[in-house]
Structures are given as structure tokens and as C-alpha cells.
Image: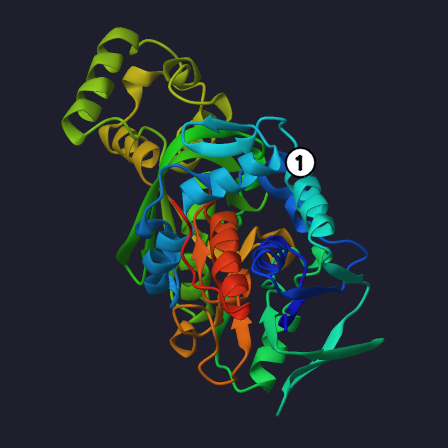
Amino acid sequence: MNRKIAVIGGGAAGMMAAVQAARAGALVTIYERNDRIGKKILSTGNGKCNFSNEKMDLSCYYGSGRKLIPVIYETFGVSETKRFFQNLGMRIKAVNGYLYPASGQASTVLDLFRYELAELSVMIHTGQQVTGITPSGNGIIVKTEQGGGQYDAVILTCGGAAAPDTGSDGAGWKLARQLGHHIIPVVPALTALRCKETYYKQVAGVRCDAKLTLYVEGGIVCEERGELQLTDYGISGIPVFQISRHAAYALREQKHTIVTISFLPDYDQQTYEMFWQERLQRQSGQTMEAFLTGIVNKKINLLLLHLAGIKAAETAGMISESAMRKLQNLYRCLEAEVTGTNPFAKAQVSAGGIDCAEVMENLASRIIPGLYFAGEILDVDGICGGYNLQWAFSSGTVAGRAAAGQVNREKR
């Protein structure tokens, strides 16, 4: 007799789990609280759906589930994901290793899932909030406001807490906690940082290449380089997103958190000093505003002048050595004191989740027989670049096949 499986959550991990379980012969039902499945996929990659990355490495992930990734990705990794979508009819475009649908539309990924789910006769209940999961002697009972049903296995894939308007509001953790699972503290990740300084409105909207270094209690935690975006409340952009989970955990523990910004990241100390010496030799008669023109964005130049206590109309050659040194240091080490992150509503993912020490390699619960997990609900979070969707597809595959009783090994 075919196994009956309930998938709680119709996001990326849930749809993949449902497809893989149904392909393995299971009778699958998806419960989705939204009025449609896959809502969050439509906003990924700025609507273009960066679904994976050819440059896959364990260092791209964090959380207690990090140790599971080699096993999970050996079963279903990047190449298997590409083949999965290609077999459904999707052409794939690679941009510096980032993988996208060639259509440039996230809706392509969602549509292909919808068509495949229909082909596999997966039953989809939208607009149904799961209110309880109860183990019974004959399986697991799923309760919803409209009813529910009894199943041989349940796969919990209802996301984390990021972008709650798409349905990821942390409800899955409540269900897991009721069943005895421990939840690693959850914080926003891949999000902007809010800073203490009051001058950001002067440079809001500026984008520039920069190197960021995150310090917690005076110690270096990590460094990132890329396009920094200055906002009216602090800093944003890909390099900020990459360090945000570390900053969020530090702030949660009320630790002093600083980001230093280098606006001239290509210069070592010797080259940097030569750069200023040569510029002074050539342009010492200019006003400081003219002297700095061409180094970085004009708004940044004027801000750093102000912070150094130098007037834009002063002549470069007349500036004191100490004031000039202070200005030069600001270009390489502007300090931003971090006071908070943007909320979950503006975060791409959440860090934290179900403690993966309580989960087996096939993503089955060690506490409740017949219960499986996949996706962001687990304590696994990746950096920007398609890594979180790849985790959703890989973990969804492993959980779906395992729940259906199939050995988790992709045929090569």
C-alpha cells in the first residue's frame, strides 16, 4: 500500500519534498496557509530566482545543520538540481556561477513545480493553517482549522521567520517545540544593519566598492568585500548581508558590535601612503573639495572631510599633518557602531531553527517517528548567492524520499 505523506508548507522545500515523495510512490498532500503555494519563490533574486550556485562549499553555510550538508548534497547537490529543472523543461543561465532560469523569471521555477505536482496528483490544500501534529499508534495526525487527516509520515517545511508576509512567521517552530524539539535562537539574516551614527542621511543612496570588517567586543569576526549601499539608517548591500547573521547574534547577546568600512580596499599600507603623498605633491594648491574629487563618491568625500574637522574650502597644502592623517585614516577605517538589524520582514532568511542534533542524516526526527524536516525551519542558513534555495531543494529531496521509504541516492 502506498504511504500517505503530509507536507506542511508549500514553499521551495515543501514543493520539492512533495515531488520527490510522490515520484517514490507516496500519496502526498500539501498543507499551505497562504492562498497559493510558492509565494516566497517569486521574490527571490529580485524576481529572477537565483536558485543555486556552481561555487558550492561548506563555508557558505552556518548553523548546527552545517555538518549534514556534505551527506545531503552528496545525495542531491547542484548538478542534480540543474538536471531536475532541465528535465522539467527549464533552460538555465549561469552568471559568475550564480544559476538562474534563462527566462529571467522566478515564476518559471514556481510554474514548473505546479505543473509537476499536478502531474503527480499531489493534493494541495491552500488557506489551511496547521494547528497541531499528534503522533498516534497508526502514524501521525495533522490537525487544521478545516479538519486535517492521518498520515504515515509528516514533513515539516513551513519556513523560518523571514518575510512573514509570504507565510514564514515561525509557526513551524511552535509545532516542532510542541513535539519536544529544541529551537536554536532565531535572528534575521541576509539583511541590512542599523547604525548609531547620525550622519547617514547625508550619504543615503550612495553605492560603492568597500571592504567591511566586523568586530565583536574588539575581536575580528569576519570580513567581506563588495558593493556597499549607504542608507539613511546605516549600511546595506551584499557584503553587509553576508555579515549580518554574525552581527545579529552578537547584538542578541548585547555585545559591542562595530563594522569598519574601507573605501579604498585595494591599497596596502605602503601603496596607500604613496597615493596621498603623490596627490599632495600634484594638487596641494587646490581646495580640499577639489583635492578629493575623483577618489570616491563626492558625498563620501564631503562626509569624511566633515568628520575629520576639515572645511571643503581649505587649501590642501595648508592642512595640518594630524588633520590630514585623520582624514586618510577615515578612508580606510570608518567605524559604524551597529545597534540593530532590519527586522524579519526585511530579511531574506532567518538564522537559527530546529537543532539539527535532534535530526538524523535523512532529516528524520530523532524524537518523533515518522516526522521529517526540510528547508529553513532547520538550523541551517547560507550566504547570498542561491545557497538557501539549494538547501531547500536538497533537504526537501532527502526528506521527501526518506518519508516515502526510498533510499536517498540520485541515480547518476
Give the vertical position of 122 relative to 364 (above or below): above
Q: Nearer the viewer, residue 347 or 83?
A: 83
Q: What residue is disc 1 on?
A: 108
Q: How is the image coloured?
A: rainbow
Q: Residue at x 32, y 40 (%)?
A: 333
- SS category of the residue bearing label 1: helix
Amino acid tagged 1: Thr
Residue 211 appears at what percent x and percent y? 34, 37
Q: How many marks?
A: 1
Q: Quadrant of the N terminus?
A: bottom right
Farthest residue in the right direction?
Answer: 146
Q: Nearer the viewer, residue 45 or 340?
A: 45
Residue 52 appears at what percent x and percent y? 47, 41
Q: Residue at x 56, y 39 (%)?
A: 85
Would residue 8 appear left or right of 289 to someone viewing this image? right
Residue 198 appears at what percent x and percent y? 54, 47
Give the vertical position of 118 relative to 144 (above or below): above
Q: Which image quadrant is residue 30 in?
A: bottom right
Neighbor class of circle 1 (other Cα within 10 Å; few <14, some 14-19, many 20+) is many
* Residue 162 visible, this angle: yes
Farthest residue in the front direction?
Answer: 1
Q: Which image quadrant is residue 67 in?
A: bottom left
